[in-house]
Image (cartoon, grey):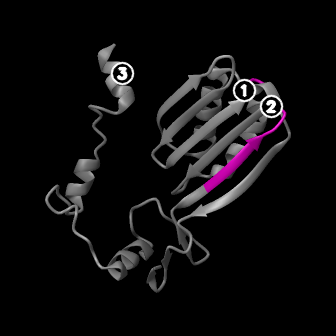
Amino acid sequence: MKDANLFQLGIGLETGAQEEDTARGFTAANTDTVLPCDMLARDVLDEDREDHFIRRDGAVFAGTHLIIEVVNGHGLDDEARIQQAFRDCVETCGATLLHIHTHKFSPQGVSGVAVLAESHISVHTWPEIGYGAFDVFMCGDARPWLAVDVLKSAFGTADVRVKELLRGEDVVTEAGIAA
């Protein structure tokens, strides 16, 4: 069981990040090197760059972050149901699940996070009033808006309210990295 606990903490996980850094010319000795902002901006604006930044309609941003409120929902105290909703969102949105962790409170409520290669999905619920506060933040080719219908179905409500944030919007522009 000790290894499972370490896995949950992320200790001993081989992510391949070290290999990716090495392939791009970064090593432990030079990761603190600061490049001029205009070089970084040119690199991020490169359409062929292999990253998860989104380039749409002339804008470059890190990802789409949806603040989703499930109202009059059912099953918001069911940890297994929430975990399945996370899995269904990940599959439907075309994301990559890395890890799910949830916690059931007493007498009620669940908090949880699904860590994704594209970012995360998180929740905190107040089942006594049928309310769930979800965050769905995804970058790259994932389609976070598809999570809205998944959550409606998973928690049996048509009342789902959404606010959208484009994370990193206006940080990178054609002129460089914004000050």
Residue drawn at (63%, 41%) of the image: 92
Which residue is the site of mark 2? 73
Determine the CA span between mark 3 and mark 1. 26 Å
Q: Which class describes the residues within 10 Å of circle 1: few (<14), some (14-19), or many (20+)?
A: many
Please provide the residue range marked out in magenta. Answer: 65-75
Residue drawn at (55%, 52%) of the image: 138
| Front residue of 139 and 107 | 107
Q: Is residue 57 above or below residue 122?
A: below
The local secondary structure at tag 2 comes to loop
Q: Which class describes the residues within 10 Å of circle 2: few (<14), some (14-19), or many (20+)?
A: many
Residue 166 in percent (x, y) is at 61, 63
Residue 63 in percent (x, y) is at 55, 59
The local secondary structure at tag 3 comes to helix
Image quadrant assignment for residue 135:
top right
Residue 23 in percent (x, y) is at 22, 58
Contact flag, marks 3 and 1 (Cβ < 8 Å): no
Determine the CA span between mark 2 and mark 1. 7 Å
Q: Quadrant of the N terminus?
A: top left
The local secondary structure at tag 1 comes to loop
Q: Which mark is residue 76?
A: 1
Which residue is the site of mark 3? 5
Image quadrant assignment for residue 112:
top right
Q: Is residue 177 above or below residue 150?
A: below
Going by the numbered disc 1, the residue's amino acid type is Leu
Residue drawn at (69%, 40%) of the image: 133
Contact flag, marks 2 and 1 (Cβ < 8 Å): yes
Going by the numbered disc 3, the residue's amino acid type is Asn
